[in-house]
Amino acid sequence: MNPANGGWVILLSLVVAMLFGVIHLPETWPGWLGWLRPNWLVLVVFFWVIELPHRVGLIAVWFFGLLVDVLYADPLGFNGFVLAGVTYVAWRFFERLRMYSVLQQCGIIFVLTLAAEILRVFVLGLGSERVWEWAALMVPTVSMLLWPLVFLFLLRIRTGARVE
């Protein structure tokens, strides 16, 4: 990520997505609202990779995944692997994904975040006695529903900051 030509905007959006991922709800709110949290980092990485595939690299994304592992206390390398997978899929098909409408991209977001959540449940379930909960499907669903808003917001930031 080159800081020239708006690289700082990409970096700042990734950092903000990381921070949104660790913000806790107030204790007075019901606990089930925690399941309505989208996977912010996947949404932001997906946007930048399909919009500017030459600006976001696998190593940078993997590095951010390592930082997220530290923030979430996940096994080291887990989120880097997930984000690298999202980046690879978006790189591989970025011409096609750009031609899709935002609603069609919602389906891709759902599949990518569902795969990430299934992998999360599997990997974190190896070390504990956790069982599958249907509430884990809420993260991909909320991510899919928020994708049009995230897309429009980041697109406006990209054009306003002239990120090339």
Image (cartoon, helix red, strand yellow):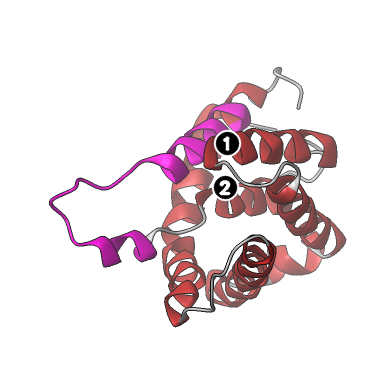
Mostly what secondary structure, the magenta segment?
helix
Q: Nearer the viewer, residue 163 or 131?
A: 131
**Dot 2 crowding, Cα within 10 Å, few <14, some 14–19, many 20+:** many
Q: Seen in the image, is 42 located left or right of residue 81?
A: left
Q: Nearer the viewer, residue 133 or 67?
A: 133
The three-letter amino acid code for the residue at tag 1 is Leu
Query: At 72% across and 50% down in the image, what residue appears?
Result: 78
Q: For the residues marked 1 and 2, what is the alpha-carbon distance in whole angstroms?
A: 7 Å
**Magenta stretch: includes residue 115:** no
Quarter of the view holding residue 34: bottom left
Outermost residue, top direction? 4
Quarter of the view holding residue 89: bottom right
| Quadrant of the rendering where the N terminus is positioned | top right
Quarter of the view holding residue 88: bottom right
Residue wearing tag 2: 41
The reply to whether residue 162 is visible in this rendering is: no
**Magenta stretch: includes residue 29:** yes
Please report the bounds of the magenta region as a residue range: 10-36
Residue wearing tag 1: 14
The three-letter amino acid code for the residue at tag 2 is Leu
Query: At 61% across and 32% down in the image, what residue appears?
Result: 10
Q: Position of residue 137 (x, y in %)?
A: 49, 77
* Of the image marks 1 and 2, the number of the one nearer the N terminus: 1
Disc 1 and disc 2 in contact, CB within 8 angstroms: yes
Q: Position of residue 44 (x, y in %)?
A: 58, 47
